[in-house]
Image (spheres, coloured by chain):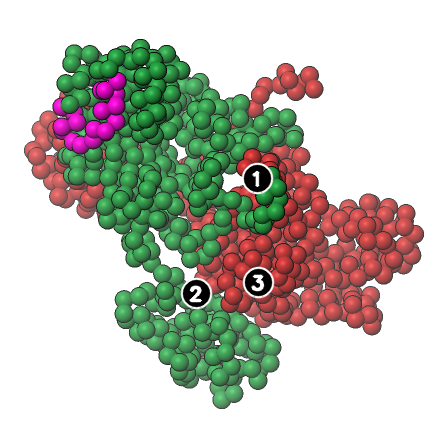
Chain colours: A green, B red
């Protein structure tokens, strides 16, 4: 305790830092690209509330997730509120209440942050930026495939050079665990170890519970198998004639065939030990990975009984992508990382304020970013003053009205990118002058007036 | 207590409902329009964290705001976290820590929700959607004017037919209160009553504290004065030669003149009793109103000493707009309320999945929203089946591959808007066929394939 007291007090909430303009801009542009694609697949955005009643939402949350939630008492009702740890459960709640509309299937998407206590404190791991989709009210391998194809599309839209979707079906492994004779509680322990590919822990559970050596070996081996048709063949040998093992394999094979037909088979590996951290999945599940980021960039799967826990049984599937991790996996210069435009500064003394205002508005109307700046004395309107101030150095052009040597209809244009080279122009010609002079600087392929990186 | 226990338990957190697709779409489009304009004025977005340490942020929050915050303990540090009640204080914290950059002025904007306990429970009043801007590191009437002009621009961009900006300067009234000889505590009480235009309460405080009748009358009358040059004249008569009263009036007059020069004077009324709820304002302050919404749509002002409370003194000004209230003030059909496009459904049996996938992707690439749908038997591919399902009725067109009577290169196109009238076309001609047939339905001025309202 004493060391904590003496440690410097952090001013920034751990795991929840602000996004400053350059990063915020990239994140917003990435969001736009991804949500644009998602929208083109017919998914419509829902904006869920930031907190929910714990007694309501907990129906859709697994105990390990519940334990990591931020909770607090609501003064006015005496009930416990929880910062959303997961949007899927919220959307399930909304749909079960009949608020999502009656026409099935429902296609929803969201961009939200979710909140979880994480012990590691690496980056923004307590407030996590997510984009996700849910396809609600229908079951079938082609609907599973739709989600997987959309996930692949999003990874491509983000400009990811390489990525792998790991695809499985929780039903196969769960059936093997049932065969092993474990108690429901021990099964859950084994599932948890399997989800985290924690083989030593799994081995321990199986040994303690005296699971047969043959079955234990199968359970361990399943976690290490991943491939393509060979995995399906291996699974079928294990399954024999047990329909409870064959069914998940057949579903998985069917989804996989759709992916191959759509030309996305090369991004997929099959993994019969694929699990997700949330206990509501009960069908096909998947994660997406790259070599460069240690943890999955996103994932999801089928949860045919989650919405039922809120009172209305509807088969469903969905996934979420972690924006921070996706961002980390993208190479600089990838699709969505254009640079921002530097502003044009329109500068005048108060006497020319009106003319400067009109000019600024005219330039904004033709798409320029404009900062209108006013110096309080006309004497300060000199090009040589500009060089000294960083706000002028980082402009794409400075337009000056009312300086010595200018008539009422004239302006100076100075270009910081060309050592403040200035020229006298007619104000009416400014849009085309700026277009030519600022664009010509961008001839190296940068956007007009782009921010030097 | 007993009545509460028997009342039906709300499933939705009070004051924090989800935004469903139609509303979410309008809100996002409004955000886009407003942030687009703000960006063109040189402001860059910051995304602040959702929670902060109370002991840090409280430096920038007035006691009445602090009392309304959602607070909870952080398990890992034992410190108290607070859901942000106000983004301005967060940005002040970030800038004071030197994280916002060194180049002044800093122009930042944000779109965030803020959280406050509100007793009324009207609408989404506990999770409030805001868009705001901050102009940091500079002082001067033209910078005050910049913010006001931007606010006017945003109201126009939202398509508001009528709105009024109420403009004042807290310095004038605060000086009158100092002259009245009230204790600092009683001054705060009087300020609070003035901010809420609570004249009876103010009268009571002034009477209890035996403030002179003349000054009490002035203090009460100030709150009821609003107008234009007449208010400035009246103020000057009250001020006489007291520089502490003349200074705020001169600043206000100077800002007002800039607004007139920019042609926005008609949207402004001056109000020497204008106060804002936050105690950090110390200069020009303003609110924006319409006749149709009972409370202000937004507001802000100058806070030259807020950032100093976090350790770095920088003059600043800013404002925020309440998106829900702005939305309520907008008339249907205003600028940002276009309707969404209905999807095209591409329908096939599994055998044509590959061709259907390629077609769906081609249509998406040319800007269509496309849902790919698969029926599991070719027999179901009949136009008459479509009429029975709502998901087809609400499509803009249905494209069917692999049905009876179609060659491999052909498709049926059925238009729900024309009683499912179907025609056989070459798949290669589909982009142009859809363009013609769906666009012609939109000849009444609706967007192509727009959602019927």
Under circle 1, the secondary element is loop
Residue B315 falls in image quadrant: bottom right
Image marks 1 and 3: residues in contact by CB distance under 8 Å: no
User: Measuring 55% from the left and 55% from the top, which residue is drawn there?
Assistant: B94
Which residue is tagged 3? B136
Q: Are there few (<14), some (14-19), or many (20+) residues within 10 Å of tag 3?
A: many
Which of the chains bears the disc numbered 1? B
Nearest the eye: B450 or B257: B257
Most frequent secondary structure within the magenta stretch: helix
Cα separation between marks 1 and 2: 44 Å
Which of the chains bears the disc numbered 2? A
Whether residue A223 appears in magenta in the rendering, the answer is: yes
User: Measuring 75% from the left and 48% from the top, which residue is drawn there?
Assistant: B192
Which residue is tagged 2? A369
Give coordinates of residue B177: x percent, y percent.
82, 57
Q: Is residue A224 visible?
A: yes
Position of residue B304 in the picture relative to residue A275 (left or right): right
- Pointer 1 and pointer 2 on the same chain: no
Q: Are there few (<14), some (14-19), or many (20+) residues within 10 Å of tag 1?
A: few
- Pointer 2 and pointer 3 on the same chain: no
Quarter of the picture holding the N terminus of chain A: top right
Q: Are there few (<14), some (14-19), or many (20+) residues within 10 Å of tag 2?
A: many
Q: What's the mark number on residue B77?
A: 1
Q: Earlier in the sequence, mark 1 or mark 3?
A: 1
Under circle 3, the secondary element is strand
Give coordinates of residue A102: x percent, y percent.
39, 25
Q: Which residues are magenta?
A: A216-233
């Amino acid at each position: 305790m004493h060391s904590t007291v003496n440690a410097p007090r952090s001013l920034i909430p751990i795991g929840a830092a602000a996004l400053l303009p350059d990063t915020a801009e990239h994140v917003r542009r990435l969001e736009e690209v991804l949500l644009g694609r998602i929208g083109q697949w017919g998914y419509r955005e829902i904006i869920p509330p930031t907190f929910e009643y714990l007694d309501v939402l907990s129906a859709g949350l697994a105990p390990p997730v519940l334990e990591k939630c931020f909770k607090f008492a609501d003064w006015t009702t005496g009930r416990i509120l929880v910062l959303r740890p997961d949007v899927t459960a919220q959307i399930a709640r909304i749909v079960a209440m009949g608020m999502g509309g009656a026409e099935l299937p429902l296609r929803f998407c969201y961009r939200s942050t979710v909140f979880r206590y994480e012990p590691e404190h690496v980056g923004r791991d307590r407030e996590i930026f997510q984009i996700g989709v849910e396809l609600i009210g229908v079951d079938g391998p082609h609907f599973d495939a739709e989600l997987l194809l959309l996930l692949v599309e999003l990874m491509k839209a983000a400009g990811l050079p390489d990525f792998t979707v790991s695809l499985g079906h929780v039903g196969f492994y769960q059936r093997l665990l049932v065969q092993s004779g474990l108690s429901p509680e021990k099964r859950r322990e084994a599932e948890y170890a399997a989800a985290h590919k924690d083989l030593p822990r799994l081995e321990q559970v199986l040994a303690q519970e005296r699971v047969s050596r043959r079955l234990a070996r199968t359970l361990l081996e399943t976690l290490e198998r991943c491939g393509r048709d060979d995995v399906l063949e291996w699974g079928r040998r294990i399954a024999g004639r047990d329909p409870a093992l064959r069914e998940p394999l057949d579903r998985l094979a069917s989804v996989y065939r759709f992916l191959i037909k759509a030309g996305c088979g090369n991004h997929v590996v099959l993994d019969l030990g694929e699990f997700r951290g949330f206990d509501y999945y009960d069908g096909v599940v998947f994660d997406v990975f790259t070599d460069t980021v240690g943890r999955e960039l996103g994932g999801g799967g089928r949860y045919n009984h989650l919405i039922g826990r809120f009172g209305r049984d509807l088969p469903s599937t969905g996934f979420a992508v972690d924006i921070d991790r996706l961002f980390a996996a993208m190479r600089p210069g990838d699709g969505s990382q254009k640079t921002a435009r530097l502003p044009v500064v329109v500068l005048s003394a108060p006497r020319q304020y009106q003319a400067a205002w009109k000019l600024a508005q005219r330039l904004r109307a033709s798409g320029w970013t404009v900062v209108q700046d006013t110096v309080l004395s006309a004497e300060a309107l000199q090009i040589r003053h500009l060089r000294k101030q960083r706000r002028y150095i980082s402009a794409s052009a400075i337009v000056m009205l009312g300086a010595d040597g200018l008539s009422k209809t004239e302006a100076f244009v100075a270009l910081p990118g060309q050592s403040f080279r200035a020229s006298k122009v007619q104000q009416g010609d400014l849009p085309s002058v700026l277009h030519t002079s600022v664009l010509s600087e961008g001839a190296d392929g940068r956007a007009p007036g782009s921010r030097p990186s």
